[in-house]
Image (cartoon, grey):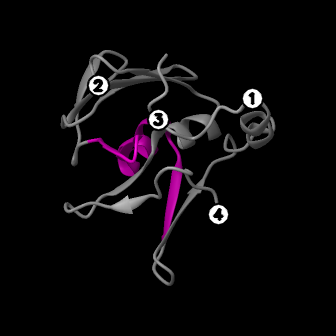
Amino acid sequence: MLYSSQQMPYTDANGRTLVPLRLVGDLMGASVNWDRKEQKAIVAVEDETIVLFIGKDTALVNNQQVKLDTKPVVQNETAMVPLRFLSEVLKINIRYIKDGNIVELQDERLLKGNVIDRMENEDLGFDGLNDS
């Protein structure tokens, strides 16, 4: 099991699963930057650019506004974002396993290129609030 050393995925009051943005971004090979002043995260992966705003129920995907079904938040200094939104935008297959209450991400892009080794060697960390 992979998870953020700062914050585990969880289900919010709206029944939505939130995951650490930095962790998913790093596993996908994305560039994830944090703008502390504007409380927003900018994610660039393949041909997608995603801007998520902490505490707002809208995001930008390739400069197009998208409504979210729950707001990104900060928990334990980690940017937590809706998994459904990320999976739809990044086209990641997810499977819910009722026994054990597990959400499984399935995508050939995950863990490509020794991402975990790179994270450990470069001490990138898993938190979502590193300044860009």
Label ID, residue 128? 3
| Mark whose residue sits in front, 1 or 4 | 1
Q: Secondary structure at mark 2?
A: loop
Foreground label between 4 and 3: 3
For residue 15, which quarter of the picture? bottom left
- Alpha carbon distance from label 1 to label 3: 16 Å
Extent of the magenta region:
72-96
| Residue plotted at (80% across, 33% down) | 121
Q: Amino acid at mark 1?
A: Glu
Element under label 3? loop
Give the alpha-carbon distance from disc 2 to disc 4, as whole Å: 29 Å
Residue drawn at point x = 67 percent, y = 44 percent = 110
Answer whether residue 66 is magenta in the image. no
In the image: residue 49, left or right of residue 61:
right
Q: Disc 3 residue type?
A: Gly
Q: Is residue 117 left or right of residue 69?
A: right
The three-letter code of the residue at mark 2 reads Gln
Residue type at mark 4: give it. Answer: Met
Q: Is residue 122 left or right of residue 44?
A: right
Reply yes or no: does residue 90 show up in magenta: yes
> In terms of sequence position, does the residue under pointer 3 or pointer 2 come before the other?
2
The residues tagged by marks 3 and 2 sit, at their Cα atoms, a distance apart of 11 Å
Q: Which residue is mark 4?
A: 1
Labels 1 and 3: the sequence-earlier one: 1
Residue assigned mark 2? 39
